[in-house]
Image: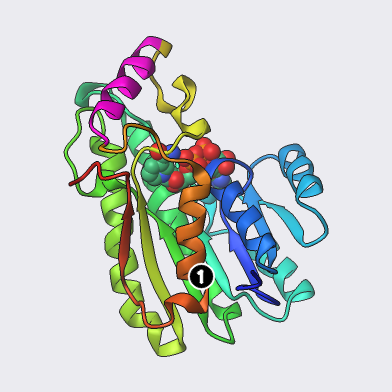
């Protein structure tokens, strides 16, 4: 316990799924947590549940170049940011023909550009060093039908993590990546995937058959890995990737 005592952590897309599980884990370890999302009501509800050390900020990851409000809030309230978890993301699946320029742009803006400019805006606040963790995906490594756009964004993110790690370590900031396999979260709903209920059901069944552990992962199982990267337990780990997929990519 208390692996993040007195630390301040910033989590993008923190109101559900892996981001929320990570916020809970960080709070349990003594951190103060700032989560971002697009909906004020949702953020209010979630931060009320999370308690006094949780703060919610409306910040659209796909428009992260406009950071004035976020940086102003941090400046007025915290001495530093110690941990950033780049987690907000969209997963638009579909055949090659179904991928429109709009889907492509939204995916790149949220998953790649959003990540980059969030880090650029927040690094100046990491004045006591710290840790940045990027949430990529096993899709950065495998070939799966219908995943070409999503996978391309996650491969970009993984490469971003490696390259930023060698640049930011000069400021005592470690950058690492977690690459989850299938984790049961709201991302797996038909609406978010852009598929029908039946397509999602068939896809999920097919996925489980490929996982040696024969089940989806839980958000909490990713949060534990993010905690490892965020805390001093990983003090000599720089530019690494940890695949957490129940053995799916083996
Ligand atoms: N669930 C999985 O199987 C899985 C596997 C590998 C990687 N991931 C990655 O994990 C991350 C979290 O996904 P999740 O599975 O917890 O699903 P989720 O839908 O619960 O979480 C995604 C979060 O991102 C937020 N978000 C999306 N677009 C945003 C935007 N423009 N601005 C701000 N926030 C935005 C959503 O509001 C949500 O809180 C994603 O980056 C996803 O690609 C998930």
Q: Residues within 10 Å of mark 1 (few under 14, many from 20)?
A: many
Q: Nearer the viewer, residue 60 or 169?
A: 169
Q: Residue at x 43, y 76 (%)?
A: 234
Q: Residue at x 31, y 20 (%)?
A: 205
Asked if residue 183 is positioned above or below residue 134 in the image, the reply reads: above
Say which element carries label 1. helix
Q: How is the image coloured?
A: rainbow
Q: Residue furthest front?
A: 213
Residue 216, located in which quarter of the rendered image?
top left
Q: Residue at x 26, y 23 (%)?
A: 206
Tell me the residue that label 1 is attached to: 230
Residue 81 in percent (x, y) is at: 62, 75
Which SS does the magenta portion mostly show? Answer: helix
| Residues rendered magenta in the picture | 198-211
Asked if residue 234 is positioned above or below residue 87 in the image, the reply reads: below
Is residue 185 covered in magenta?
no
Asked if residue 92 is positioned above or below residue 140 in the image, the reply reads: above
User: Does residue 112 appear anywhere in the picture?
Assistant: yes
Is residue 199 covered in magenta?
yes
57 sits to left or right of 149 = right
Q: Residue furthest top?
A: 198
Q: Residue at x 61, y 47 (%)?
A: 20
Residue 101 in percent (x, y) is at: 32, 33
Q: Nearer the viewer, residue 213 or 248?
A: 213
Image quarter in which the N terminus is found: bottom right
Q: Nearer the viewer, residue 187 or 148?
A: 187
Residue 31 in percent (x, y) is at: 68, 68
149 sits to left or right of 85 = left
User: Does residue 60 appear anywhere in the picture?
Assistant: no
Asked if residue 204 is positioned above or below residue 166 in the image, the reply reads: above
Residue 43 in percent (x, y) is at: 72, 44
């Amino acid at each position: 316990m208390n692996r993040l005592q007195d630390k301040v952590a910033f989590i993008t897309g923190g109101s559900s799924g892996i981001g929320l599980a990570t916020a809970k884990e960080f709070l349990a370890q003594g951190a103060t947590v700032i989560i971002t999302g697009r909906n004020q009501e949702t953020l209010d509800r979630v931060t009320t549940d999370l308690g006094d050390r949780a703060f919610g900020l409306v910040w659209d990851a796909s428009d992260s170049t406009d950071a004035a409000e976020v940086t102003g809030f941090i400046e007025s309230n915290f001495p530093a940011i110690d941990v950033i978890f780049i987690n907000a993301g969209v997963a638009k699946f579909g055949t090659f023909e179904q991928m429109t320029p709009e889907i492509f742009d939204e995916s790149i803006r949220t998953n790649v550009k959003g990540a980059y400019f969030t880090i650029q805006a927040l690094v100046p606040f990491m004045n006591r060093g710290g840790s940045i963790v990027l949430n990529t995906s096993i899709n950065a490594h495998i070939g799966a039908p219908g995943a070409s756009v999503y996978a391309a964004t996650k491969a970009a993110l993984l490469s971003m993590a490696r390259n930023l790690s060698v640049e930011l370590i000069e400021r005592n900031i470690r950058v690492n990546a977690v690459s989850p396999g299938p984790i049961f979260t709201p991302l797996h709903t038909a609406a978010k995937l852009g598929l029908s209920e039946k397509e999602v059901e068939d896809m999920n069944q097919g996925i489980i058959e490929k996982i040696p552990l024969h089940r989806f992962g839980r958000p909490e199982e990713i949060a534990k890995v993010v905690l490892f990267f965020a805390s001093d337990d990983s003090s000599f780990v720089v530019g690494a990737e940890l695949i957490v997929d129940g053995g799916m990519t083996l």
